[in-house]
Image: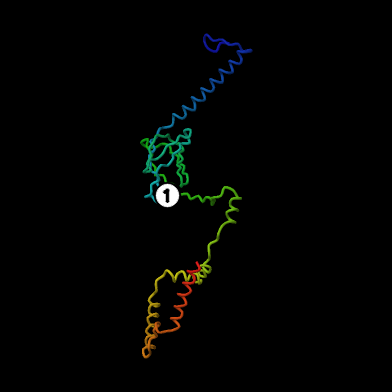
Amino acid sequence: MKLFPGITCNISGEGDWYMKYLIAILFLFVTIGAVAQKHDDRPVVQFTGVVHNADSTNVIVPYVSITNTSTHNSVGQSNYKGYFSFVAHEQDTLRFTCVGYGPVTVVIPSNVSNKSYTLQVSLKPQIINLPTFHVFPWATTDEFKKDFLAIKLADDDLEIARKNISRTSLVALGNVLPRDAQEIQTATAQGMHTSILNSHSLTPNPLLNPFAWGSLIKQITDADNKSSSN
């Protein structure tokens, strides 16, 4: 059988396989041509617009992804001012997506005048509550148990107050802290009181005390004896 001038194929055997192969290729070309012809028949439109926040028209949403689902998911993007402008076809479906906002789908209508379509796209803010995630500085549970058992708990308010008023703490503070006005006034008043009591009596002189002289002589003697023994 002759398919084209100068080309002859046998229906039986190997020729049958070639026949099916050629028919499949021709059918594929016809289908692709029909789809392309149908796509090309749609009028071209200059699609322009601005993307803003649906809650406030004064807030611009920048860098929004614009996916044309009618043309093999081709992706475009708005600029930092939310402005976009590109060529599309009538009845194309466009999907606007951005992090933190809900997606919006726009379909370009048919019979657009002046081959230009302008739209103000509004994106609704979308809040997604993520589950709580805790970060621990321990690699394993055994390490956590070890550190937990070795932890030293801080003193509570009652224990801190008890330590602050203990005798040891008060003596240590008394050795380093200067006297306040109340202590100085008390010492001055005590000295004035003693002076008033002894104003009509003789002040004792240690040089005239025989017991003091005896104690001094004893200390000197003991010191000399100790030096001789050494």
Residue sticking out furthest to the front: 228
- Closer to us: 112 or 166: 166
Q: Which of the image's four quarters has the N terminus?
A: top right
Residue 111: image location, x then y, percent: 41, 36
- In the rendered structure, which amino acid carries the disc numbered 1? Ala
Q: Residue sitting at 44 percent across and 40 percent down?
A: 65
Report which residue position mark 1 lands on. 54
The answer to whether residue 193 shows anywhere in this view is no
- Closer to us: 54 or 35: 54
| Count of numbered labels shown in the rendering | 1
- Closer to us: 190 or 101: 190
The answer to whether residue 54 shows anywhere in this view is yes
Q: Is residue 210 left or right of residue 20?
A: left
| Colour convention | rainbow
Residue sticking out furthest to the bottom: 200
Residue 39: image location, x then y, percent: 46, 30
Indicate whether 167 appears above or below 37.
below
Q: Residues within 10 Å of mark 1 (few under 14, many from 20)?
A: some
- Closer to us: 190 or 162: 190
Residue 165: image location, x then y, percent: 49, 72
User: Which SS class for mark 1?
Assistant: loop
Residue sticking out furthest to the top: 6
Q: Residue sitting at 38 percent across and 47 percent down?
A: 60
Residue 106: image location, x then y, percent: 45, 41
Indicate whether 126 appears above or below 205.
above
